[in-house]
Image (spheres, rainbow, N blue to C red):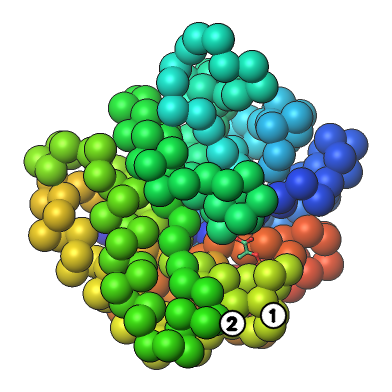
Amino acid sequence: MIRKSLIIANWKMKLSPREAFSLTRSIVPYIRVAAGARSRNSFVICPSFESLSCVGMLLKKTPIALGAQDCFWEQSGAYTGEVSPTALKESGCSYVLVGHSERRLYCSESDSMIAKKMAAACETPRLQPILCIGESLAIRKKGTYRSYIQKQLEAGIALIPRTKRVQFCVAYEPLWAISTMGIGLPIGPEHCAEVTTWIKTLLSQKLPGAHVRIIYGGSVDSENVMPFLQRGVSDGVLIGGASLTVRSFKKILTVLNQ
Ligand code: PEP
C-alpha cells in the first residue's frame, strides 16, 4: 500500500464564506488531479465554521476531505456558541484541529480543555482530531523544547484510554515557525525529523493501540514542502498562509505532482 502524505489547508478566519467558496471552486480541479489514484498525497481543507457547508458542498464526490478548526468537548447541551464533534461529523467533516496555538493564545485554551476536546473527537466515529503542539522561540532557545512538547502531548492525550484503538494526527508546529506568529521561517527537516521521531516513540509507549500520523506545520510553501514529506521526516504538512490563494496553493500542488 502506498504511504500517503496528508496535506491539510488551514484557512483560519481569513476568508468569508463567499471567498472560501470561490477559492474552493478554483482549486478543487487542481487538487483532484494531485489526489488522483496514484497520488502519494491526500488532502484536507479546514475552512472556518460558517464556511463548512458551502465548502463541503463543493468537496462532495471529490477525494478531498473536509476539516474543522475546533470543536467542543460535549456532544450536546447548553453550551452557547460551541460546536460538537458529532455536529461536525454530520456537517461532513472527517477531521478537526484541536489545540491550535492561536486558540491556546487568543482563546486561553488550556491543556485540560484540549484533553477533553481530544477525547470527545476520538469518541466520534470517523472523525479524526489533529492535536497541535509546539514550543515558543524562548523555549527552543532555552533548549527545553523536548520536555515542553512532551508535557503538551501527554496532556492532550490524557483522557484517551491507553489501549484504545484510536486514529488521530499530531501536528508539530513550533510557534516561531508559524507565519503569523513567529519569524515566518520554517524549521529545517532534520529538526523536524528529530521531533516527529521522538513524538512517535512517546506515543507508541503511551498509546500502543493508537494509529497516529505526525505532521509538520509552520511556513510551509511550494519552495520548502518536499523535504518535509520525506519518509522519516513527517507524515504530512499543515499549511496556513500558502493555502489561501489560488496561486500559492496551485504552486504547492505543482511541486507535489512532480
Ligand atoms: C498554521 O496556522 O497552522 C500554519 C502552519 O500557518 P502557516 O503555514 O501560515 O505558518
Residue closer to the observer: 210 or 71: 71
Number of residue marks: 2
Vertical position of residue 224 compared to residue 158: above or below: below
The location of residue 223, given as percent across then percent down, is: 66, 84
Tag 1 secondary structure: loop
- Identify the amino acid type marked 1: Gly
Q: Left of 5 or right of it: where is 17?
A: right
Residue 152 falls in which quadrant of the image?
A: bottom left
The location of residue 7, given as percent across then percent down, is: 54, 60
Asked whether disc 1 touches disc 2, contact meaning CB atoms under 8 Å apart, the reply is no
Query: What's the residue at 89%, 37% (across, down)?
Result: 18
Residue 30 seen from this side: yes
**Is the shortest distance between ligand 1 and the CB of mark 1 under 8 Å?**
yes
Residue 171 falls in which quadrant of the image?
A: bottom left
Residue closer to the observer: 38 or 235: 235
Residue 39 seen from this side: no
The location of residue 227, given as percent across then percent down, is: 49, 84
Vertical position of residue 200 compared to residue 197: above or below: above
Q: Which residue matches tag 1?
A: 184
Q: Left of 215 or right of it: where is 25?
A: right
Query: What's the residue at 84%, 35% (across, down)?
Result: 17
Query: What's the residue at 51%, 68% (across, down)?
Result: 173
Vertical position of residue 19 compared to residue 143: above or below: above
Q: Which residue matches tag 2?
A: 186
**Is the shortest distance between ligand 1 and the CB of mark 2 under 8 Å?**
yes
Tag 2 secondary structure: loop
In which quadrant will I find the N terminus? bottom left
Q: How far apart are marks 1 and 2 (CA)?
A: 7 Å
Quadrant of ligand 1 in image: bottom right
- Identify the amino acid type marked 2: Pro
Q: Residues within 10 Å of mark 1 (few under 14, many from 20)?
A: some
Residue closer to the observer: 254 or 151: 151
